[in-house]
Amino acid sequence: MKFKPENYGISSDYKHWVGDKTEDYIGPFFFLIDGSTPRTAFRIQEHNLNAHDSVHGGVLMAFADYTLCMGANMGQSESVVTMTCNNEFVAPAYKNDIVEGECEIVRRGKSTVFCRCTLRVSGNVVLTGSAVIKRVKNR
């Protein structure tokens, strides 16, 4: 299923990554490759909330992983998998907030990509993360 970002209050410049059922179920998540800075976005919905009516930390970690992987493959069809992912929660986010992610590539090697991400709501940091992403060669 293909989702439209404008149906979630996200700019139509963003695209939906087709093929990941979990990301669609949690999100849907969207991405934009703007030069060398991959960006991501999703709107927090009722099913993303924890018992405190803020976004569940696991949802933010899944979105951070999505952001880091989009950075690693630059929105292309290259397959990547997460080897390590570390996250620090900075502030809560709530229903209807749009979470925006940005990925920075620290180093891109032949088989691995080292990257960092920041997730924000209205410009305020809610999570920072880093990862080592494995580039998977097609057989």
Image (tube, helix red, strand yellow):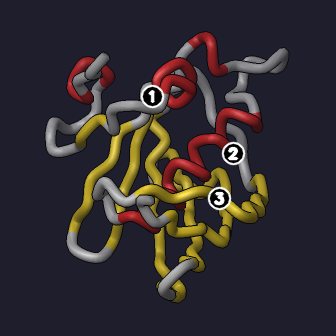
Give the residue type at disc 2.
Met
Nearer to us: label 1 or label 3: 3
**Mark 2 and 3 residues: CB-CB less than 8 Å, in contact?**
no
Give the residue type at disc 3.
Thr
Left or right of residue 106, residue 47 in this image:
right
Residue 111 on image: x %, y %: 54, 79
Left or right of residue 128, residue 37 in this image:
left
Left or right of residue 112, residue 50 in this image:
right
119 lies above or below 94: below
Tell me, for residue 82, which label it has, or none. 3
Q: Residue at x 45, y 28 (%)?
A: 43
Image quadrant containing the N terminus: top left
Q: Residue at x 51, y 68 (%)?
A: 135
The quarter of the picture where residue 30 lies is: top left
Q: Residue at x 78, y 20 (%)?
A: 50
Q: CA distance from mark 1 to mark 3?
A: 23 Å
Nearer to us: label 2 or label 3: 3
Residue 110 on image: x %, y %: 48, 85
Tell me, for residue 61, which label it has, or none. 2
- Which secondary structure lies at badge 1? strand
Residue lying at the far left in this picture: please name it. Answer: 12
19 lies above or below 72: above
Nearer to us: label 2 or label 1: 2
Q: CA distance from mark 2 to mark 3?
A: 12 Å
N-terminal of the two: label 2 or label 3? 2
The quarter of the picture where residue 132 lies is: bottom right
Q: Nearer the viewer, residue 34 or 107?
A: 107
Residue lying at the far right in this picture: please name it. Answer: 51
Q: Which residue is mark 1?
A: 43
